[in-house]
Image (tube, rainbow, N blue to C red):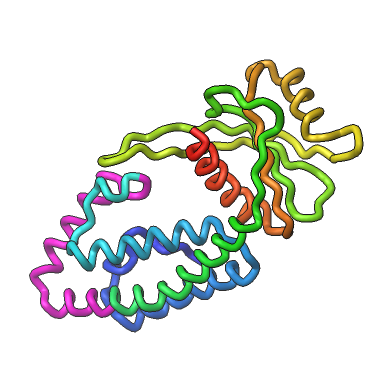
Amino acid sequence: MKALGINWFIEGSIDFEHKKYVLLAYLQHINKHFRSSQLYPDLGDLIFHYNNLLHFKNNKVLMQQNFPQRLTKADFDALKLTYEKMVKDDYVMQEIEQIITYSLEKMNPALQQGKEIYDFVETRLLIDSVGVIPLVPDFGYLFIRNGDEKGLHVYEYSISVFEGKDDKFRGINTSYIANYSLSFVHTPESIKIDLINSRKQLPNPAVYQVACDINFPLEQTLLPVAKRSLVKYISKAA
């Protein structure tokens, strides 16, 4: 299925029935993944489009600073020009408002379902440190145990701090390292030592293990939720 464009609701033909068809096809795709507990990238995309519509409804124009990760200057300028043309046409604006109202109403149940899945996955996570954690735990390794799998998914992580308008925000990046089989002698502690010996760029890494007692899709669900949970865990500890 083709993903929704940033300005899908005002691009091309401004026709409620057509936009309704486009939206329902998109939500069918989203709901299919949610039923399989596959959250990402669909949940993040759905949240963006919901907030996009809501912001347009409340302000009648998107501000560039509100969506820096998705809205480029070219996107913003094009949207502003389109809005200036449309605002002069009462019929077009009424059609757009109908599209937005309908879309928000239809997106909301899917959004709530996605959040419920996210919250449920988060409640099944147990986060522990592996060995001694350095004073600045912004770089290190993330171990993930997925349900009854007999192994550890190992990632290198780094946390960055972003200055927002009123607060600081932490983001996390990960890169996959390897999958280690666990055994009586091959423990998380021994895996940490192996990583230190084989990867000299992190001589004193922070290492955290995130264990989940239920199997979830790794890339689409468990890893994204684990990453965000780890950022909250480290922030709270700090």
What residue lies at 64% left-to-right and 44% top-to-bottom? 127
Residue range of the region highlighted in magenta in the rendering? 69-98
Does the rendering let one see residue 22?
no
Q: Residue furthest bottom?
A: 17
Residue 161 drawn at (x, y percent): 41, 33
User: Relative to 150, does residue 11 appear above or below in the rendering?
Assistant: below
User: Relative to 45, does residue 180 appear above or below in the rendering?
Assistant: above
Q: Is 89 one of the magenta-colored residues?
A: yes
Residue 124 drawn at (x, y percent): 65, 57
Left or right, residue 21 beside residue 40:
left
Does the rendering let one see residue 95?
yes
Q: Nearer the viewer, residue 162 or 106?
A: 162
Residue 77 drawn at (x, y percent): 20, 50
| Magenta stretch, main secondary structure class | helix
Left or right, residue 140 beside residue 20:
right
Q: Residue furthest front?
A: 237
Q: Quarter of the image holding residue 117?
A: bottom right
Q: Quarter of the image holding residue 166?
A: top left
